[in-house]
Amino acid sequence: MPSILKNRMVSLFLVFFLLPSCGYHLSGSGDLVPKGATTISIPVFINGTDQPYVDIEITQAVVREFLVDGRLDVANLDSADLALHGRVTAYEETALSYTAESYVQQYRVRLVVDVRLEDRRSKNIIWKEQGVEGIFITDYPITYSPTNTVEITATKTAKEEAIRKASQDLASTLRSRVLEGF
């Protein structure tokens, strides 16, 4: 066996078998959710932007994220142990690229929320953070016809999909911060 191949095999062995046993691991603090809490309510986020329905999209994405995760049951506000309240504070579209005729060709979507997690049993605020946003970049193209007019339906569909993706990314970030302390 050539020595380069042997060295690579030894390196792989070290990485996969020895490093995990060194006590190094990546995890959040996980201490946001109080002991005994099994349910969470996610009231509709408040929309502090001029983009209609973005609050609904984000709220639905956060609810889906907690439902899929399953560690906390999603419940109505009256019967929940915890409540995750949010306010959409920013919806931004930034031009990313332009056509040769200087028309916008692609936009980037950015969503920002302020959130707080409340223990409904003790009435204490467990966690509060401003300016939370997703970690991935979400963008959408502008579709033009051969005569350089905007194809409104295709562009609107692409924008709505970008908002859904940005909302899902933000929802994943919020779930992670609540349940893993990240």
Image: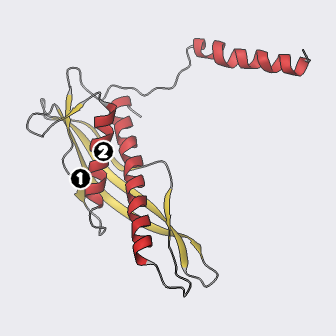
Q: Amino acid at mark 1?
A: Phe
Colour logic = secondary structure
Rendered position, 144 above or below 117? below
Quadrant of residue 119 within the rendered picture: top left
Residue at image location 18% in from the left, 47% down from the top: 43
From the top left corner, tell me how far across and down residue 134 is, in percent: 43, 49
Q: Amino acid at mark 2?
A: Val
Check the picture and name the quadrant holding the N terminus: top right
11 left or right of 73 in image = right
From the top left corner, tell me how far across and down residue 11 is, in percent: 76, 19
156 left or right of 41 in image = right
Q: Which mark is residue 62?
A: 2
Rendered position, 116 above or below 28? below
Helix, strand or loop at label 1? It is loop
Residue receiving disc 1: 45
Rendered position, 108 above or below 17? below
* Nearer to the camera, 156 or 136: 156
From the top left corner, tell me how far across and down residue 94 is, in percent: 49, 68
**Contact between labelled residues 1 and 2, with CB atoms less than 8 Å apart:** yes
